[in-house]
Image (cartoon, grey):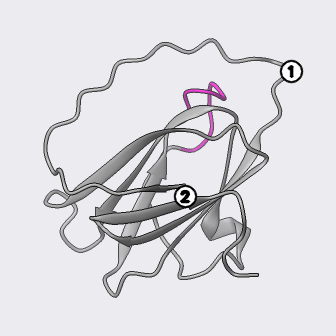
Amino acid sequence: MYFTSSFIGLLSLATACIPSITAANNDVWVRSLSSEPIDAMVSGFSTGGGVTSWFPLPSNYDDPSTSLWRRTGWELIAFRDHDNQNTTRVGFYKDFAANETFVTFYSFDYVAFSDVNPEL
């Protein structure tokens, strides 16, 4: 499944979440194949917690400490330019209910989501 976006602007998102105590966190693997340094963050709505800070993206899924988020369901995943943090951003509200989701950032106009690891 692929999502693209060329809209850059103000996004207002309001949501309420009642986390499930029995919900297992799923793996959300994120990488960047952009020539520019990119940061990413994944909200913690579905888990009722988790780290939601911005992190620089690696170019592969090799190191879970830099490319893995554990989330259960609907989350906001956002990307920003690492060097110009307040200029260019894009985000998606996505259901991460699959056991594993692989996200590849190519550009602010092209972000790919897959349930199959594209590195294999």
Where residue 98 is drawn, which disc sits there?
none
Q: Secondary structure at mark 2?
A: strand
The part of the chain drawn in magenta is: 44-51
Which residue sits at x=66%, y=29%?
A: 47
Residue 100 pos. (x, y %) = 74, 53
The residue singled out by tag 2 in the image is 113
Q: Find residue 49 and report its image quarter.
A: top right
- Quadrant (top left, top right, bottom left, bottom right) of the C terminus: bottom right
Q: Which residue occupies 34% across, 88% down?
A: 35
Q: What is the x, y in percent for residue 74?
A: 56, 31
Type of secondary structure dominating the magenta stretch = loop
Q: Where the N terminus falls, by quadrant? A: bottom right
For mark 1, what is the residue? 22
Rendered view: 13 above or below 97: above
- Left or right: 98 in relation to 52: right
- The quadrant holding residue 24 is top right
Indicate the amino acid at tag 2.
Answer: Phe
Label 1 element class: loop
Structural crowding at the residue carrying mark 1, measured as other residues with C-alpha within 10 Å and reported as few (<14), some (14–19) or many (≥20): few
